Amino acid sequence: MHQKTTESDSLYQNIDQMSVNEILNGINNEDKKVALAVEKALPQIEALVLKVVENMQLGGRLFYLGAGTSGRLGIVDASECPPTFGVSHDLVIGIIAGGDQAIRKAVEFAEDDTEQGYKDLEKFDINPIDSVIGISASGSTPYVLGALKECKNRGITTGSLCCNQNSEISKWVDFPIEVVPGPEFISGSTRMKSGTAQKMVLNMISTAVMVKLGRVKGNKMVDMQLSNAKLIERGTQMLMNLKNLSYDDAKKLLLEKGNVRKALEG
């Protein structure tokens, strides 16, 4: 059995003897490799995005499923869709092994349960127009793998995101994505380059999907929720530029209409 890239030895020796400057430079040098690794996977990412868009146009939802860092990254991406794009909280859903308590504190052995992943999806009445993306740096997390196998058996669209080539998870999904950024700075610490790669790909997936669903106008987040002063200010500036309004008139219109899109249409 060949060694997984995510488990391979760091290219750096005696890290514990390094200066802070050497540590930071080493991490930075490794991080530079991540975007290039993502670039190689763009065709895989595109194929998955197109299918997710197709399903969502039929009324489907997008689920992210993962354990540990991978699960947390899915939850981060899902939770940012409502404020950024004005969609409901039940359109993009992140699920983590061990439940929401695992977001802050690791739940021992939660990732080793092969049946719980699909059980967690069942709580949302998962159906064939939904899309499920399993996130696993290793590509072999039992919680994720078990759920994806069951989804595939039931005709639910499946995708995966991992950081090893020819991974187990890729064999069981319709749309595998493999981004291989190489050995971690600290051997096996997949919260580093692998986590960065996963975050970048999730950004791409959710952003591209929302753009194709019409949630961006030009290059502007016209459906963003006005949930804080910064976003109200941003929306006001958008309206000033797009409708040639004064600051006070733009802000008044924005607050009356509730978001930039409605203000532009009003």
Image (tube, rainbow, N blue to C red):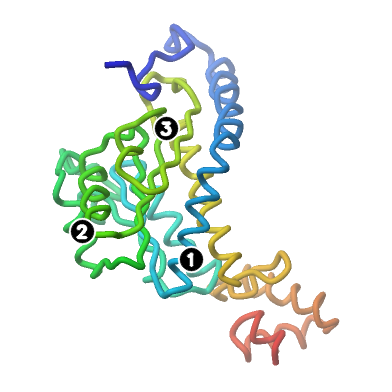
Look at 59% across and 85% down and name the residue there: 258
**Residue 7 horizontal/vertical position (percent):** 34, 21
Quadrant into which the C terminus falls: bottom right
Residue 229 occupies which quadrant of the picture? bottom right
Callout 2 amino acid:
Asp
Callout 1 amino acid:
Glu
Does residue 197 appear in this view?
A: yes
Mark 1 Cα-neighbour bin, 10 Å: few <14, some 14–19, many ≥20 = some
Vertical order, 229 against 115 (above or below): below
* Sequence-first disc among 1 and 2: 1
Mark 1 and mark 2 residues within 8 Å of each other at the beta carbon? no
Secondary element under disc 1, as helix, strand or loop, is helix
Give the residue number, with chain letter if any, for mark 3: 163
Look at 20% across and 66% down and name the residue there: 123
Give the residue number, with chain letter if any, for mark 2: 120
Secondary element under disc 3, as helix, strand or loop, is loop
**Residue 51 horizontal/vertical position (percent):** 47, 59
Left/right of residue 240 with respect to residue 21 in the rendered view: right
**Residue 226 horizontal/vertical position (percent):** 57, 76
Give the residue number, with chain letter if any, for mark 1: 54
CA–CA distance between discs 1 and 3? 26 Å
Vertical order, 81 against 136 (above or below): below
Mark 2 Cα-neighbour bin, 10 Å: few <14, some 14–19, many ≥20 = some
Does residue 252 appear in this view?
A: no
Residue 213 occupies which quadrant of the picture? bottom right
Secondary element under disc 2, as helix, strand or loop, is helix
Q: Which mark is residue 149?
A: none
**Residue 49 horizontal/vertical position (percent):** 51, 55
Look at 33% across and 35% down and name the residue there: 139
CA–CA distance between discs 1 and 2? 24 Å
Look at 51% across and 69% down and name the residue there: 83
* Sequence-first disc among 1 and 3: 1
